Image (tube, rainbow, N blue to C red):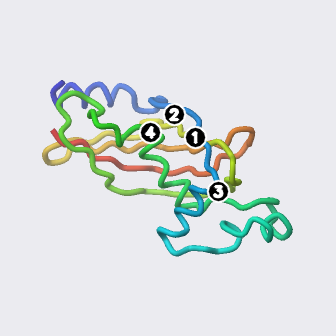
Amino acid sequence: MSQAEVLADLQSKIGSEIHVSDWHVVDQAQINNFADATGDHQWIHVDLERAAKESPYGATIAHGYLTLSLYPMLREIVKPEPPFPGVINVINYGLNKLRFTNAVRSGAKVRSKAVIAAVDEVKGGLQVTETVTIEIDGEERPACVAEAIMRYYF
């Protein structure tokens, strides 16, 4: 697919949901590994006994940034094959907006939904802005809502 074809395809989908991931369990091992990687060992994330007694959630919760960091995996951006034929590189360009609207308890299942918000040409490729919602199974409020910007280079 040429860059022009991908641009036209994506622009026709602005405002549309383009991806819903499978559910992913955020378990305590993943939370602990994230705590080790970031140095954030706050008790609400890693102390099961204290969190059961003192946390308003009754359990440990995932770090907000752990929840956000699951997006590329949930969105399948990190798969070996490109999202479109002809794309040679996908770059995480950043975020326009980010809100953590609900806590993810250890053992909860999350999934992502992506809606195309904007598509623009940039030198050598396309910049795609997606409104990302990370939902929690059984919860009304999502864990995270963000505007994620990816660049696809051809």
Q: Nearer the viewer, residue 59 or 98?
A: 59
Inter-mark Cα distance, 1 to 4? 12 Å
The residue drawn where x is 55% and y is 68% is 35
Residue beneath label 3, please?
A: 28
Residue beneath label 2, please?
A: 21
Q: Amino acid at mark 3?
A: Gln
**Which numbered disc covers residue 75?**
4
The residue drawn where x is 44% and y is 43% is 73
**Which numbered disc covers residue 24?**
1
Q: Considering only vertical position in the picture, is 114 above or below 66?
A: above
- Determine whether label 2 and label 1 are within 8 Å by CB: yes
Occupied quadrant, residue 14: top left
Inter-mark Cα distance, 1 to 3? 13 Å
Inter-mark Cα distance, 4 to 2? 6 Å
Q: Amino acid at mark 2?
A: Ser
Q: Residues within 10 Å of mark 4 (few under 14, many from 20)?
A: some
Q: Residues within 10 Å of mark 1 (few under 14, many from 20)?
A: some
